[in-house]
Image (cartoon, rainbow, N blue to C red):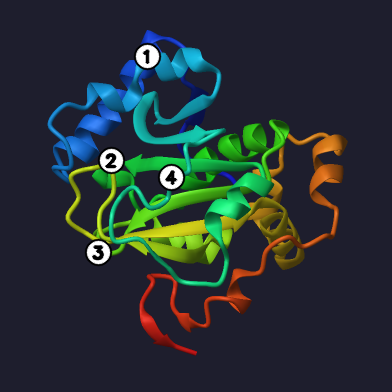
Amino acid sequence: MQSKFELEVIRVDDDWGRAQALSVMRATYRDDKGWLAREESLVARDELRSGNVSWFVARLDQQPVSVLRVLYSPPLDLKAGGGFRPLSDLDLETFSREHRIAEIGRFAAVPPQRRNFLVAAALMRAACTETIRRGCSHYITDVSAGEKDRPHSFHTRVMGFEAVATQDAGELNCPNRRVTLLLSLRDAYHRLRTKGGWLFNYLTESWDAELHAVMSRTAKVLDVSQTNSGYDSFGNRGVN
């Protein structure tokens, strides 16, 4: 897919990259959403040095416009936020011990770029490639059920995340109910490959044969749709 602008994704590994990520955080989490007063802790230097976290920044025409973070061994204390309600028979805490789960989050874009699908796809391409190389099998994330311009549609309709739980509150100063989503990376690979189109080719553009071989295995490890009947992807009842 061709574009008329210069789009690149950088992996944050120094103070310059951190400043790029923080500029997006200031424009979104602080100024636009009002979710926090001090943004510095959101891109902590300790995280960048830990080797267990990756921050990615999308730059459009040399300007930072979107960010994404991946935690490769997240502390999955899923009930810590309060008001935790599972939407399926899946025991998330047991599942997290039996699978290599990475937490993908801090998915934010400056207001003018929130409907730029290619920016979101570019970040997801960088994140997925590194996550799979590290041997992780699933993504988990929290989204706000009532947030305007949320990344919910991209997560569920494009990538295939499915709702598995809700919480009354999360770690940020956000008043909305949180929805926990889970994605099997292998299932997403097979679904996008079967569907065809430019997105699968774009997401796997830099992959070697080894990565394709890992993801081409057909064993299915999760089918949330068979266990959360009666809930939609926002965690609401009344859906067949």
For the point 29% across and 57% down, the residue is 149
Q: Determine whether, in the image, residue 207 is placed left or right of residue 88.
A: right
Q: Determine whether, in the image, residue 113 is placed left or right of residue 138.
A: left
In the picture, the disc for residue 146 is 3
Label 1 sits on what residue type?
Arg
Q: On the image, which quarter does residue 239 sit in? A: bottom left
- Of 92 and 154, the residue lying toward us: 92
For the point 58% across and 76% down, the residue is 227
Question: Residue under circle 1?
Answer: 45
Label 4 sits on what residue type?
Asp
Residue 65 appears in the rendering: yes
Do labels 2 and 1 touch, CB within 8 Å? no
Q: Earlier in the sequence, mark 2 or mark 1?
A: 1
169 over 64 or under it: above or below: below
For the point 62% across and 45% down, the residue is 97
Question: Residue under circle 2?
Answer: 110
Q: Secondary structure at mark 1?
A: helix
Q: Secondary structure at mark 3?
A: loop
